[in-house]
Image (cartoon, rainbow, N blue to C red):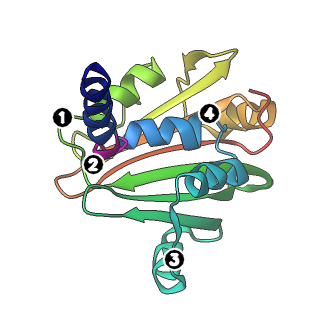
Amino acid sequence: MKLAAAFAGICVLACATTARAESLFEFFDAACLTTHASSAAALAVADGKHWSVMPADRAAGLGKYFGEAKADFRGRFSAVDRKALAVGDVAFAEAKSLPLSFCIVAGAPDAGESLKSEAAAFAAVPAQEHTPTSGPTFYGFTEDAGKHTQILHPEDDAVMLPLVQSGRLRVLVVMEQPTVSLIAIALPAKSPN
């Protein structure tokens, strides 16, 4: 009898655990932060969680937003979990030889999750001053052995270019809307961290 009760308890716990969808930030952490925005590694995380390759027509529709960037897409669309992942590389401003890797996770807003709060806690620096009150929030910082330091003049290429070259630049973007939330990071493609 005790064994049956223990088994029932395990089943209830397992069912509750599997029914809960991974939050946007949890997946962003696993696919984008832990992998340092590596396209191959982020796609492997999504593939390991049985995400689908985006159909060509849907990927082409998203691709127009990425301009010259080469992007790969994955998606997870179920009754309890709707998310998309975009990863790739894009040139830094005018310095075409300095690619930035980007990793973006978007999806339906998670009940009870404050993506902006989680992003702010991760960034551990103030949002950029020119960030509008509605729309995306931007964080520009450098990363040295896990320590984040705010970039004071992100609009100045003379400030940004050495940070890209050093591999220390990080740009975090977060947006919460009623129908979609998004979090993204961009960093030098050959980042030492």
Residue type, mark 4 in image? Thr
Q: Residues under labels 1 and 2: Cα distance?
A: 20 Å
Q: Are marks 4 and 3 in contact (CB under 8 Å)?
A: no
Q: In the drawing, what numbered circle is on residue 112?
A: 1
Residue at disc 4, secondary structure: loop
Q: Residues under labels 2 and 3: Cα distance?
A: 24 Å
* Residue bearing the label numbered 4: 34
Q: Earlier in the sequence, mark 4 or mark 1?
A: 4
Q: Residue at x 24, y 49 (%)?
A: 109
Which residues, given as a range, are shown in magenta?
18-22
Q: Residue 129 location in percent, x, y?
A: 37, 29
Residue at disc 3, secondary structure: helix
Residue type, mark 3 in image? Ala
Q: In the drawing, what numbered circle is on residue 59?
A: 3
Q: Residues within 10 Å of mark 2 (few under 14, many from 20)?
A: few
Relative side of 11 to 44, left or right: left
Q: Are marks 2 and 3 in contact (CB under 8 Å)?
A: no
Q: Residues under labels 4 and 1: Cα distance?
A: 24 Å
Q: Nearer the viewer, residue 73 or 134?
A: 73
Q: Residues under labels 4 and 2: Cα distance?
A: 26 Å
Find the residue positioned furthest to the bottom.
Answer: 57
Which picture quadrant has residue 20? top left
Image quadrant where one finds the N terminus: top left
Q: Nearer the viewer, residue 60 or 22?
A: 22
Q: Residue 41 location in percent, x, y?
A: 69, 48
Q: In the drawing, what numbered circle is on residue 135?
A: 2
